[in-house]
């Protein structure tokens, strides 16, 4: 909801993603968690708990809209990602959900550390009642006593966040087991699902797989996907961990799960310290060495005749296997016992389920750099997504827009639509900015038609060599060419506008289209306004490369059209 009373259930990619997930697994769990909130909820404060009813209304309408417009049932709703919770807000949210007939939607809190949420729940019986799951982020496989005393489900509700190399795969394999063994956590959620953003942004390639080239279609099914399969193909939400789980004598760990209907899945991992370090927290040293482990099946499990075996070995390409099916184990002659030889950096799944399969896929298109000549006129009658392809908004929101009153060439544009700063999660910039292109670009020409909507105060820019994004966007350097509705222009070496290369007067006013061109070549740059030189041979020494970008001076409406970039290699 960009503005008060502004309800639109077709923005962004998340609706599409949830529906695609449901096509593949109709039973998949859906959760919602606000990272930031629209600014208008804060009534001038960077705080979502100014009006508890209003914030709860905002969250509940999203859940209701998910069902109404997309037939999606949201199963869990969170509070505020890695930020403060408000006890009264959580209670108000529960009451409002119930009032809307959403008793089945469960509340998870607080998506931060185990404390102070666990202690708060022990001290407040109503709070204890309304929270269904305690979710902690990056718990390092450990929980705390207070959390256990609540007797609630404990989840690692955000984890992994590690480069999806074999070390990332090792991290994922280790914590999938040990979050339960050490910390009694019965769910582990990886941030993030697919690395589909420019690799040089913070946390590049920290997804379970990589698909960061929409222009080529190239993608990589990385090792963490197959690590996941060792658990997810042979268990389901609703299965139970057995209590007889733990660490192996010479390093590594094992868990066992059952559906309570006779099925059994055992997952064994021997990830070494060196090859399983996650990005956080620090991992105390431990040793893993070759060993034999004997498992004995008792009770009703003693009658299991056969276990399927799936195997992964991380490390040297020559001996590397990802999710390979081995010969099954026959247990009838052995009195329900079997012995595995375990070496380091291995993963075994032993299971009664015969449904495991290593999916195959056609060879993806080969990797290509971002096209060196790229243009977009935004002329899309009925866009499938609200945002234009390849543009990555770092602050603000850039959406396809239709000018009803402009029958001419600027009927379809890209518009920055936020008119106030959001209640931020991280350090958003004070300007809006969307980046595009290849981070390696150095010499390039960016050309774009721009339209200021705010008289006197408005400002827009085009830029090249933008060197930062994400949580670091405030300190982005580059070459930024600004024009302002008060009839001035400026060239700066940073987004914040502290480093001024040159400035002056320009024949510019609001509510009129202008064409800006920015050329950067080696150590020099120049700019034109409507094809006429406005400034030239301005010296730019840093940075040497980066993305192209468009944006506005503040949270203001502005439009962009006929974007074109040409990079000279």
Image: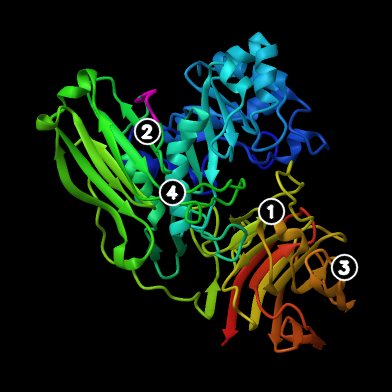
Front in this rendered view, residue 61 or 492: 492
Front in this rendered view, residue 80 or 420: 80
Could you tell me how far apart the alpha carbons at marks 2 and 3 are, in whole angstroms?
A: 56 Å
Could you tell me how far apart the alpha carbons at marks 1 and 2 are, in whole angstroms?
A: 45 Å
Mark nearer the viewer, 2 or 3 = 2
Q: Earlier in the sequence, mark 1 or mark 3?
A: 1
Q: Position of residue 485 (x, y in %)?
A: 84, 65
The answer to whether mark 1 and mark 2 are in CB contact below 8 A is no
Image: magenta residue range: 239-245
Q: Is residue 52 left or right of residue 288?
A: right
Q: How busy is the neighbourhood of tag 1: few (under 14 within 10 Å), some, or many (20 plus)?
A: many
What residue is at 76 percent from the left and 47 percent from the top? 421
Q: Position of residue 80 (x, y in %)?
A: 66, 34
| Disc sitting over residue 396 in the figure | 1
Return the residue at label 2: 255
What residue is at 30 percent from the left and 35 percent from the top? 266
What residue is at 53 percent from the left and 16 percent from the top? 151
Could you tell me how far apart the alpha carbons at marks 4 and 2 are, in whole angstroms?
A: 17 Å
Determine the secondary structure under disc 1.
loop
Q: How busy is the neighbourhood of tag 3: few (under 14 within 10 Å), some, or many (20 plus)?
A: few
């Amino acid at each position: 909801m960009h503005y008060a009373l502004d309800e639109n259930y077709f923005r962004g990619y998340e609706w599409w993603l949830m529906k695609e997930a449901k096509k593949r697994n109709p039973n998949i769990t859906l959760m919602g968690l606000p990272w930031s909130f629209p600014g208008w909820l804060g009534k001038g404060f960077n705080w979502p708990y100014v009006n508890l009813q209003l914030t709860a209304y905002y969250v509940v309408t999203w859940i209701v809209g998910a069902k109404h417009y997309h037939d999606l049932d949201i199963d869990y709703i969170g509070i505020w990602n890695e930020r403060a919770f408000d006890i009264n807000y959580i209670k108000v949210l529960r009451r409002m959900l119930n009032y809307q007939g959403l008793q089945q939607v469960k509340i998870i809190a607080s998506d931060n550390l185990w404390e102070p949420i666990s202690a708060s729940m022990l001290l407040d019986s109503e709070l204890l009642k309304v929270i269904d799951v305690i979710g902690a982020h990056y718990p390092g496989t450990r929980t705390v006593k207070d959390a256990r005393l609540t007797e609630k489900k404990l989840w690692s509700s955000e984890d992994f966040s590690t480069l999806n190399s074999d070390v990332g795969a090792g991290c994922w394999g280790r914590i999938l087991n040990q979050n339960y063994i050490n910390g009694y956590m019965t769910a582990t959620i990886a941030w993030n699902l697919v690395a589909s953003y420019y690799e040089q942004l913070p946390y590049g390639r920290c997804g379970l797989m990589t698909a960061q080239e929409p222009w080529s279609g190239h993608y990589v099914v990385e090792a963490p996907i197959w690590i996941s399969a060792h658990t997810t193909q042979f268990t389901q939400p609703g299965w139970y961990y057995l209590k007889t789980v733990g660490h192996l004598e010479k390093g590594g760990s094992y868990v066992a799960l059952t559906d309570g209907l006779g099925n059994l899945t055992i997952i064994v991992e021997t990830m070494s310290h060196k090859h399983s370090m996650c990005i956080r927290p620090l991992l105390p040293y431990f040793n893993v060495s070759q060993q034999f482990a004997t498992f004995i099946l008792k009770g009703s499990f003693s009658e299991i005749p056969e276990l399927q075996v799936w195997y992964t070995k991380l490390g040297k390409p020559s001996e590397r296997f990802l999710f390979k099916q081995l010969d099954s184990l026959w247990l009838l002659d052995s009195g329900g016992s079997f012995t595995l030889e375990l070496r380091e950096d291995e993963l075994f799944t032993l299971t009664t389920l015969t449904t495991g399969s290593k999916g195959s896929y056609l060879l993806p298109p080969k990797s290509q750099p971002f096209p060196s000549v790229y243009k977009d006129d935004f002329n899309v009658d009925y866009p499938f997504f609200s945002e234009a392809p390849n543009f990555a908004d770092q602050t603000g929101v850039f959406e396809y827009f239709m000018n009803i009153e402009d029958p001419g060439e600027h009927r379809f544009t890209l518009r920055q639509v936020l008119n106030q700063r959001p209640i931020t999660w991280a350090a958003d910039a004070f300007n809006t900015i969307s980046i595009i292109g290849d981070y390696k670009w150095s010499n390039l020409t960016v050309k774009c038609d721009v339209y200021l909507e705010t008289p006197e105060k408005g400002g827009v820019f085009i830029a090249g060599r933008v060197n930062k994004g994400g949580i670091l966007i405030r300190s982005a350097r580059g070459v930024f060419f600004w024009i302002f509705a008060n009839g001035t222009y400026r060239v700066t070496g940073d987004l914040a506008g502290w480093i001024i290369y040159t400035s002056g007067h320009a024949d510019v006013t609001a509510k009129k289209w202008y064409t800006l061109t920015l050329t950067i070549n080696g150590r020099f740059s120049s700019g034109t306004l409507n094809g006429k030189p406005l400034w030239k041979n301005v010296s730019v020494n840093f940075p040497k490369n980066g993305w192209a970008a468009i944006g506005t001076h503040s949270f203001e409406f502005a439009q962009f059209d006929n974007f074109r970039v040409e990079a000279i290699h």
